[in-house]
Amino acid sequence: MIQIGTDELNRQLGGSVASMITTNTTRPLLGSKLQDLSNDSNNHCLSQLESLTGKSFDQIKSAADSIQYYDMSTPAARLMMSDLGVTNISNQNLTTYFFAGPDAPTALTIPGTQFVLLGSQYFTGQALLGSATIPIATTDAFKQDTLFHELWHTLGVGDLGGSGAFDNWLQGGCNGPPPGAP
């Protein structure tokens, strides 16, 4: 008989429910972005992604619909890698993994998975009001671009030259090879 402690059960249940809520509110943003790109004959982003991955639009859309999102400001941040079935990375909680680098990222895909971790910068940006910096909610367009960037990683595309380079390329209609592409 397997026994699960109350703390572990609370962590798993709370994290799973938080992820489900985040996923259900986030997927439509990426779906809308993919549809907009699909409808724009002057934009080459999807054809670039199809070319790099060998996947059709329908396969890309299906992959996008299977991504699980974890908001690092919710109980999902307490989940362990083993709770997600991730065995190729040391068993640490998502918060430790997310903040392992020098700067907190906006979003981060766990390599080789359909799991995307969303940091506070995904939800809140900054604006200047006089000489003061104040927090503001990020736009849906910013969120969609971030999710589209992470979709590439979930599909196995590695280095994209950083968020700034990818964003500039995306805003330019994805002409030419993506930044960082082989």
Image (cartoon, helix red, strand yellow):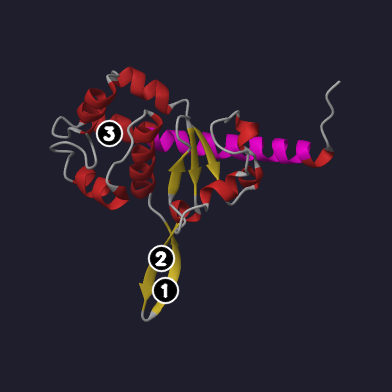
Amino acid type at mark 3: Asp
For marks 3 and 1, the one nearer the N-term is 3
Of residues 104 and 100, which is closer to you in this image? 100
Residue behind mark 3: 36
Question: Taking 106 as reference, is 33 above or below it?
Answer: above
Question: Taking 24 as reference, is 171 above or below it?
Answer: below
Q: Secondary structure at mark 2?
A: strand
Q: Are marks 2 and 1 in contact (CB under 8 Å)?
A: yes
Label 3 vs label 1, nearer the camera? 1
- Residue drawn at x 52%, y 53% is 99
Q: Is residue 71 magenta?
A: no
Residue behind mark 1: 133
CA distance for labels 2 and 3: 27 Å
Classify mark 3: residues with Cα within 10 Å, few (<14), some (14-19) or many (20+): few
Q: Are marks 2 and 3 in contact (CB under 8 Å)?
A: no
- Residue drawn at x 39%, y 40% is 147
Classify mark 2: residues with Cα within 10 Å, few (<14), some (14-19) or many (20+): few
Classified by dominant secondary structure, the portion drawn in magenta counts as helix
Amino acid type at mark 2: Gln
CA distance for labels 3 and 1: 33 Å
Classify mark 1: residues with Cα within 10 Å, few (<14), some (14-19) or many (20+): few
Left or right: residue 133 versus residue 58 is right
- Residue drawn at x 25%, y 33% is 37
For marks 2 and 1, the one nearer the N-term is 2
Left or right: residue 165 versus residue 111 is left
For marks 2 and 3, the one nearer the N-term is 3
Left or right: residue 168 versus residue 13 is left
